[in-house]
Image (cartoon, rainbow, N blue to C red):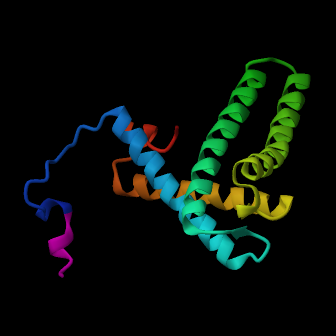
Amino acid sequence: MSERSIRPENVVGMPERLTISKWQLLYVGWALTLLAYIVVLNLWVEFNSKVVIDSFVISIATSVVLLVLLVIILGFEHRVKHWFAQREGTAYRVLGTASTLLILFLSKFVILEVVDLIFGEHVELGSFVDVLLLVLLLIVAQRAIVFGWDALGERGSIANEEILSE
């Protein structure tokens, strides 16, 4: 296949502009992020002997749980950070930073406990450090998807502002 034949303008019937609803953007963002989480989690299981997941289906369910947990945790962390940022004074800046770090630190224990409650002996995510590294890898994977989305689209468009940011 030649380079010329795979360009968007060579696709028959492709409109110049597309209208995408907010729900469609949300769906695409969650679906792409979930797929990335599934890949990262299964690679993490493959290369880290401390992490054990009994089956691929359980790894998909674990990825869903991790996605929901990270959305909740990061949303809470952003709200706390924003609350302290609206206040004036050094004490609020220090407390805001300390609160953010505390939330991010304690959330790894929450993740370990929730996964253990839901999946029991079928999923073992390893130690605190293993979960910390896994969460960092999941966030990097999600940011890589956003980077790819931005690279393919027009920078500054509303779609780039909304997709994957939920």
Q: Classify residue 4 as left or right of residue 77.
A: left
Up-down relation of residue 25 to residue 136 (above or below): above
- The residue lying at 65 percent from left, 77 percent from top is 46
Comparing 7 with 121, the one in front is 121
Q: In which quadrant of the rendered view does residue 127 lie?
A: bottom right
Q: In which quadrant of the rendered view does residue 130 lie?
A: bottom right
Q: In which quadrant of the rendered view does residue 140 lie?
A: bottom right
Q: Residue furthest front?
A: 121
Q: Classify residue 95 as left or right of residue 147.
A: right
Q: Position of residue 149 (x, y in %)?
A: 41, 54
Q: Residue furthest top?
A: 87
Comparing 96 with 123, the one in front is 123
Q: Classify residue 40 as left or right of residue 91.
A: left
Q: Position of residue 54 (x, y in %)?
A: 66, 69
Residue bounds of the magenta highlight: 1-7
Q: Position of residue 38 (x, y in %)?
A: 55, 62
- The residue lying at 71 percent from left, 62 percent from top is 123
Up-down relation of residue 99 to residue 111 (above or below): above
Q: Position of residue 156 (x, y in %)?
A: 40, 41
- The residue lying at 85 percent from left, 43 percent from top is 106
- The residue lying at 60 percent from left, 43 percent from top is 68
Q: Does residue 11 show up?
A: yes
